[in-house]
Image (cartoon, helix red, strand yellow):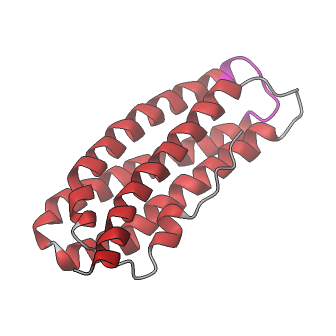
Amino acid sequence: MASHDRDRAVALSLQLAQAHQTLRRQINQLKANLGRDRPGDDVLVTHCLAFCAALTAHHEGEDAGMFAELLRHRPDLTKTVSNLVEDHGMIAAILSRVADLADAAAGSRGSALEAIGRELDGLSAIMESHFNYEERAISAALDDGVPDTGWSGMVFGFRDGAR
């Protein structure tokens, strides 16, 4: 592999870790600001939906692009990728509950926000486990030269737009 290609591959594993760090920061900011909005504000809904969209885009980009390309070059990672895709499905279900709760609780206090907080706590724990596993399991394979066939835009291209 040419030096430039190798540098680009290494950059992909670093970009993956950075994307995960951005998502960690976003969920932590969302949790920290839960309940600080004035009654009637749609800030909670807006920020929950922005976070949900960012995490969903990241996972969809992994599933449809990065993982597909990874498996073309490393079929030995089929079980690992299957586990990661299964995690994505579980996370998507939680994201759907968070979005529904945020929509129902816009401008609320008390138990509605506590329910969102519990979902976010659970989501945060699952994300942490998932991200750590993913980074351990596939970073070396990314560093070995999985081509970016355009999938990196969705995996790494979301904005750091949470509070």
Which of the pair 116/137 is nearer the observer?
A: 137
Res. 41 image quadrant: top right
Question: Which residue is depicted at the point 69% across and 49% down?
Answer: 161
Could you say where residue 105 lies in the image, as x and y percent from the top left? 74, 33
Res. 27 image quadrant: top right
Could you say where residue 132 lies in the image, as x and y percent from the top left? 31, 42
Question: Which residue is depicted at the point 39% across and 65% down?
Answer: 62
Say if 149 sits above or below 13 in the image: below
Could you say where residue 148 lies in the image, as x and y percent from the top left? 38, 77
Question: Which residue is depicted at the point 74% across and 23% down?
Answer: 35
Which of the pair 68/5 is nearer the observer?
A: 5
| Residue occupying the far front of the picture | 3
Tell whether position 106 is magenta: yes
Which of the pair 90/130 is nearer the observer?
A: 130
Q: How many marks?
A: 0
Which quarter of the rendering shows the C terminus?
Answer: top right
